[in-house]
Image: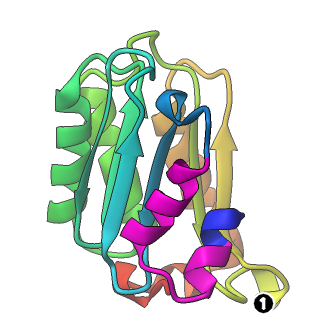
Amino acid sequence: PEGLALLAMGVDAQTAVQVLTGKDDQKLFRQLGIVDRNGSPAAYTGSECQAWAGHKTGQNYTVQGNILTGGEVVDAMATAFEQSKGPLADRLLAALSAGQDAGGDSRGRQSAALLIVRRGGGYSGLSDRAVDLRVDDHPTPIKELKRIYDLHLKTFGMLSYLYSVTEFE
C-alpha cells in the first residue's frame, strides 16, 4: 500500500523502491518490484533472501523470485514477457510458464496466481480487480491457472483484458 501511495503521488519506481527499502530494517530479507506509470521498472532483492534470489527488469515489467532453481528462471520469464504479444494477462501467463519450464521453484510446483488491477476494471466496474485468480496446492498450478483464466474469460468476457501493458496506468 505504501508503494501504491507513492506512485499515486507521482513518484517514479526507482524513488519508490529507495523510499520503501530505506526505512525498512528488515530489507535484507525482502524483495520488491515496481513499475511506474511510464513503464519504468525498479527492483530490489535483499542479500539475505533465500537462495537462489534475484530479479530482472525491463520496460513495463519486473521479474523477481527467490528459492528458485537459478537465475535462468527470471531470465526466461523476462524473455517470454518481452517476446509475447496480446493482453497483459496472456503475457504474464507466458512468463509464468517460461519460468516453470526453466526450473521454477526449487521446492517444486504448488501454487500460481494472476492479479491485474485497473481502476474500474472489475466486474461491472465495481472493483479495480480486472483479473484475480489463484491456484493453491495443485500438482500443475500454472496449467490449472490457465484453465481457470479461460473459464473466467468465457464467464466475464474480454472487456477487462484487451488492454495492452502500457495502458495499465
- Expressed as whole percent of the image width and height from the top left, the position of residue 3 reads 61, 66
At a point 45% along the width and 12% down the height, the residue shown is: 108
Say whether residue 13 is left or right of residue 57. right
| Image side of residue 5 versus residue 20, left or right | right
SS majority, magenta: helix
| Residue at point 47%, 37% (across, down) | 142
Q: Residue at x 40, y 52 (%)?
A: 93
Look at the picture and state if 86 lies above or below 166. Answer: above
Residue 70 at least partly seen: yes
* Quadrant of the image occupied by residue 65: top left
Indicate whether 139 appears above or below 155. Answer: above
The single residue placed furthest to the top in the displayed view is: 107
On screen, residue 23 above or below 135: below
Q: Residue 113: where, in percent of width, then height?
A: 58, 45
Does residue 20 show up magenta in the picture? Answer: yes
Q: Position of residue 118 (x, y in %)?
A: 62, 81
The span picked out in magenta is 5-23
Residue 112 placement: quadrant: top right
Q: The residue tagged with tag 1: helix, strand or loop?
A: helix
**The stretch drawn in magenta includes residue 35:** no
Residue drawn 26% across the image and 38% down it: 74
User: Which amino acid type corresponds to the residue marked 1 in the rendered image?
Assistant: Gly
